[in-house]
Amino acid sequence: MSKEEILSLIAQGEGQHLEFKESVAELDRVIQTLTAFANTNSDGGCVLIGVGDKGKVKGVIIGKETIKQIADKISAHTDPVLYPKIEVVKESQDKGIIVITIDGSPNKPHLAFGRAYKRVSSTTTQMTRDEYERLLLERHKDKFQFDCQLCEGATLEDIDEKKLRWFLRKAKAERNLDIDPATPIKEALERLKFLKEERLTNAAILLFGNDPQRFFLQVRIRCARFKGIKGLDFIDMKVMDGTIPDLREKAMKFIMNHIKHAVFFDANRRYDRWEYPLRALEEVLTNSLAHRDYLSNAEIQLSVYDDRIEVWNPGELPKPLTPQDLKKKHKSIPRNKLLADKLFLIKYIEQWGRGTNRVMEEMEANNLPEPEFQNLSGGFEVTLIGPGISFEQEIEKQKLHVLEINERQRQAMEYLKENEAISRRTYMELNKVSNKTAFLELKNMVEKNILIKEGRGRSVTYRLKR
């Protein structure tokens, strides 16, 4: 690195990728910062020794053994060992700036003096235990994925046989799974890869457990129906527990109890429409259960407002996926692969990498805004925007279209929205028609199950059928 390049680097100031140290006496802090760069930044970072905090170049005296001593101390006090690039840029005949550069590491987390560090802007701070364990798990994810880990204390008595049999029947029907639903419990679990060393995995308890929350308190969905759009007051709040299929079913029932639903008939058909597409909601809930971070103590949160539904689960998108990637063709990067494989068997997951695309398609088919995806507060959130008042307006239009009534009869329907009943005389005056026409058209609406006729003779009136 040239002197001009050093000055250009110093001019940038300390930050996420750059640290200044005045002297070699601060080497312990230098080593902590190098591990922070390796742990936090994909492109690493650089420490300049011989530069003050405010960027003033001071230089350090560099002896014959200085660089070797620095390299030896770094290797002696980092684990896994860091091997940074160390070079000297001469400032004067006897002084220079020591430039130590480290790349981002695929072998993180690295420790300095037995502790893990991270870089936050221009500061090096110690990682929390959770942060350290998360990085460690990521490094050994093929061996230590949560769903593949052994469930401490769980035995075959913790398996609900009915839930296992249901799973086997459904998997056979949906994906032609080659396991007879009557297979003995232990053999079925072994063939599903839910038994390791004669012990149950976490995934087995999540799918078939009698009481999953006895082992995993965080495996819940906290559901809330808020009044209005700000989330200040509850209309209803429930905490759901059970297996993953139980949780999806209970959460769907909660949503269906708190969103609008239109059902209406003509003579031969039933019309049934929900405020939100149910398939999109099922997909969002399945994704939150399949891909959440089960090491987190947080629960999945389902929030229903007047204008939207939000589903948040702990665990951000696995890198390199971004929220924008989910709106186009993308690869699937499952956080819990064993679990995702089994949910695929029962068709909770249709095709890997297509779930969010299907949500978008369902929303578009229902003339609703595209879903919003974002990493939020250490988790991932999906927001589905509803139709608002336009849902009721559209249903009314559709009802009238299905009922195949003429414009005068539509006018009578509008009148009955504001009034309890309509008489034949009122119909005549409203539409400027004869007594006979009014009689025939009101009779036609009774035959189509739109109106109910009440009274006799001149006192006959017509009301909307509820």
Image (spheres, rainbow, N blue to C red):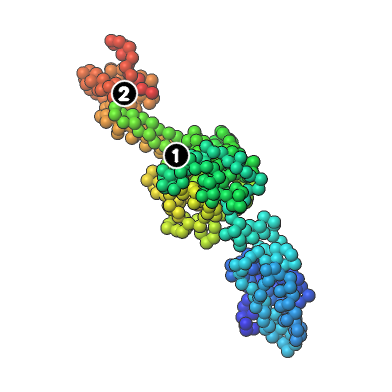
Q: Quadrant of residue 449?
A: top left
Q: Residue at x 48, y 40 (%)?
A: 182
Determine which of the numbered discs, if any, sits on residue 458 in the image: none
Residue 142 pos. (x, y %): 57, 59
Residue 174 visible (yes or no):
yes
Residue 96 pos. (x, y %): 71, 83
Residue 464 lies, with reference to residue 311, above or below; the image says above
The front one of 212 and 19 is 212
Residue 427 pos. (x, y %): 28, 21
Q: Residue at x 71, y 74 (%)?
A: 75
Q: Which residue is mark 1?
A: 388
Residue 201 visible (yes or no):
no
Image quarter where the C terminus lies is top left
Helix, strand, or loop for circle 1? loop
Crowd around label 1: few <14 · some 14–19 · many ≥20 (10 Å): few
Q: Could you tell me if the residues under marks 1 and 2 are in contact, i.e. CB atoms within 8 Å? A: no
Q: Residue at x 29, y 21 (%)?
A: 446
Amino acid carrying label 1: it is: Gly
Amino acid carrying label 2: it is: Asn
State left or right for residue 281 relative to residue 47: left
Crowd around label 2: few <14 · some 14–19 · many ≥20 (10 Å): some
Q: Quadrant of residue 59?
A: bottom right
Q: Nearer the viewer, mark 1 or mark 2?
A: 2
Q: Which residue is mark 2?
A: 449
The front one of 222 and 439 is 222
Q: Residue at x 69, y 85 (%)?
A: 90
